[in-house]
């Protein structure tokens, strides 16, 4: 039996916590031991960047952070093979100097490949390139019986599509093979554009989706009336090396004598700021957030710039532990998607409910998605997605989010499980019509339901053991 440490674990939002025995295997054999011996139930955990309760379990939690070896890199085709504890930061360190960038990346590079597969993460390019599934060739899954299944579109395909977006409930992802995107520089050419209201924002997205590989809007969630939905759009493409301005050098890390050119080096000097402790709840109140939103909107004009990849993809990574600014009670991120046909009315209803609730939202992001894939619990579907961060004000915010769920259900949308900590089982069933098919496949791979989590018990995705525990 491998050693463990007991600790209370939460998600990135710091809202719900459970005491767990944490196992940190270093080899596949240790991982197998942990799965076999860690008690009744367990769940895999990566870097804990899921906002809610998907990677917490009152029982065993297996950390994949020491199972983080790069196994192979095909420099011709840009195919990387790595253990599931490898992060997007690691992919960049290995891939970029060789001219390859992650084909799909979430908004922080502190996410593991296992966590990214389990959430089927999307980036700013979903409309063009799909979700992580689209660049994933295959992975190995260690199941509750100790068997290792190779899963791809052609081998154990049911397990493949249940695991993508399956929030760790089918087993532990051991390693994976991913295709990266060829690039000739570490920079993006970005157009920033202000819009006056939601219609203008949606229209710009519709017009620009074919021109821009990456597309996202910061949206002022406190604006009301004729300004409802006013935004700052940020849309861009990888900059070809021959189009780089002459003055990009000073932003780059030193080449350290490697063979690649400075245009493929990473920006330096990021990530040095840190929020030292949980801040007081008074820092983020509706007044300060309203002032921030108004200032942010005013300061951004229309402009065209070449920026390094950190500034474009990972702006929040510049401040370590930024989640502490919300204080000890933490915060919730609410991310919902509406199908194309109902996007406008759904977003108007959601934004009006948010703006009139007086619940301050500091960060709100709007994106468009391309078509859904076959992932049974995968989040993206063709349409528009809005993500807002809200301080945990207890019953007030929980009541608001219950109301938002009803708006989302009425418009045929769904809420992202990787961000969720409070969705009811009833709302979940209405949003994810393939939940029963997921349960059927989980029961076949994990008949007792040993892979379990707080999220699974809340949403009725546990197997036999978890259901008994939830009922007790
Ligand atoms: C600042 C920030 C920005 C973000 N931006 C985006 C974004 O743009 N797009 C997006 O889609 N998401 C985004 N996310 C969410 C994040 O990508 C997901 O929650 C991701 O799952 C977190 O991965 P992790 O390694 O931290 O895993 P954890 O949070 O530890 O776990 C998340 C889930 O993955 C499972 N899991 C982890 N490792 C394994 C494994 N080896 N085998 C099986 N299951 C495993 C866990 O059981 C859990 O269900 C963002 C999060 C933050 C904090």
Image: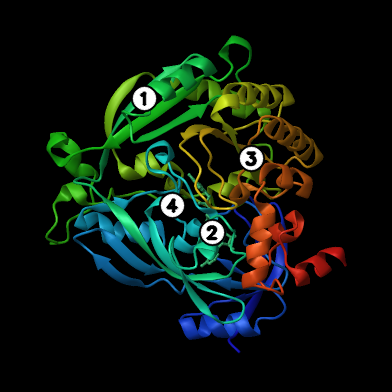
* Residue where numbered disc 2 is placed: 118
Query: Mark 4 near mark 2, Cβ–Cβ under 8 Å?
Result: no
Which quadrant would the C terminus be assigned to in this image?
A: bottom right
Please state the horizontal and vertical placement of residue 264, each as a whole percent of the image.
20, 50
Q: How many numbered circles does the render carry?
A: 4
| Residue 166 visible from this viewpoint | yes
Quadrant of the snapshot with the N terminus: bottom right
Ligand 1 under 8 Å from disc 2 Cβ: yes
Residue located beneath label 1 in the image: 208
Callout 3 environment at 10 Å: few (<14), some (14 to 19), or many (20+)? many
**SS assignment at label 2:** helix
Which SS class for mark 3?
strand
How far apart marks 3 and 4 lie (CA) works out to: 19 Å
Of labels 4 and 2, earlier in sequence is 2
- Which mark is on residue 414? 3
Q: Secondary structure at mark 1?
A: helix
Q: Residue at x 64, y 40 (%)?
A: 414
The residue where tag 4 is placed is 132
How far apart are labels 1 and 4 at the CA level? 22 Å
Label 4 near ligand 1 (CB < 8 Å):
yes
Query: From where the camera sits, is residue 221 visible?
Result: no
- What's the CA distance linking mark 4 and mark 2? 10 Å
**In this view of the protein, which residue sits in the foreground, 214 or 209?**
209
Image: 109 above or below 219: below
| Residue extending farthest right | 472
């Amino acid at each position: 039996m491998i050693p463990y440490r007991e600790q209370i674990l939460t998600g990135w939002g710091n809202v719900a916590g459970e005491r767990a025995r944490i196992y940190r295997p270093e080899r596949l054999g240790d991982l197998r031991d942990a799965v076999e011996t860690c008690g009744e139930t367990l769940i895999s955990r990566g870097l804990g960047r899921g906002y809610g309760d998907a990677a917490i379990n009152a029982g065993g939690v297996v950390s994949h952070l020491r199972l983080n070896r790069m196994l192979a890199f095909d420099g011709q085709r840009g195919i990387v093979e790595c253990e599931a504890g490898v992060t997007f930061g690691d992919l960049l360190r290995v891939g970029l100097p060789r001219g390859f960038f992650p084909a799909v990346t979430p908004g922080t590079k502190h996410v593991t490949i296992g966590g990214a597969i389990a959430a089927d993460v999307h980036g700013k390019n979903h409309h063009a390139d799909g979700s992580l599934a689209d660049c994933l060739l295959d992975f190995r899954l260690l199941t509750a019986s100790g068997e290792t299944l190779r899963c791809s579109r052609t081998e154990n395909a049911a397990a493949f599509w249940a695991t993508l977006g399956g929030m760790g409930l089918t087993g532990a992802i051991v390693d994976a093979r991913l295709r990266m995107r060829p690039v000739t520089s570490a920079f993006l050419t970005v157009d920033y554009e202000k819009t006056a209201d939601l219609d203008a924002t949606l229209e710009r997205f519709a017009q620009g989706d074919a021109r821009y590989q990456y597309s996202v809007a910061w949206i002022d969630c406190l604006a009301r009336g004729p300004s409802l939905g006013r935004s700052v759009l940020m849309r861009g493409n990888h900059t070809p090396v021959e189009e780089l301005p002459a003055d990009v050098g000073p932003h780059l890390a030193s080449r350290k004598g490697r063979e690649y050119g400075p245009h493929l080096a990473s920006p330096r000097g990021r990530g040095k700021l840190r929020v030292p402790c949980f801040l007081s709840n008074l820092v983020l109140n509706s007044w300060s957030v309203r002032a921030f939103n108004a200032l942010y909107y005013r300061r951004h004009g229309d402009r065209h710039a070449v920026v390094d990849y950190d500034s474009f993809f990972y702006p929040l990574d510049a401040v370590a532990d930024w989640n502490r600014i919300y204080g000890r009670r933490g915060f919730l991120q609410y991310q919902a998607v509406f199908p194309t046909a109902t996007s406008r009315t759904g977003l108007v209803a959601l934004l009006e409910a948010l703006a009139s609730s007086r619940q301050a939202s500091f960060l709100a992001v709007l994106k468009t998605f391309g078509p859904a894939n076959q992932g049974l619990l995968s989040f993206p579907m063709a349409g528009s997605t809005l993500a807002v961060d809200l301080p945990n004000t207890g019953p007030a915010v929980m009541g608001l989010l219950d109301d938002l769920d009803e708006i989302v259900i009425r418009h045929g949308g769904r809420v992202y499980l990787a961000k969720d900590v409070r969705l009811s089982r009833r709302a979940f069933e209405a949003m994810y019509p393939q939940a029963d098919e997921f349960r059927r496949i989980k029961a076949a791979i994990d008949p007792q339901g040993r892979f379990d989590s707080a999220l699974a018990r809340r949403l009725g995705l546990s197997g036999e053991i978890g259901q008994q525990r939830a009922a007790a």
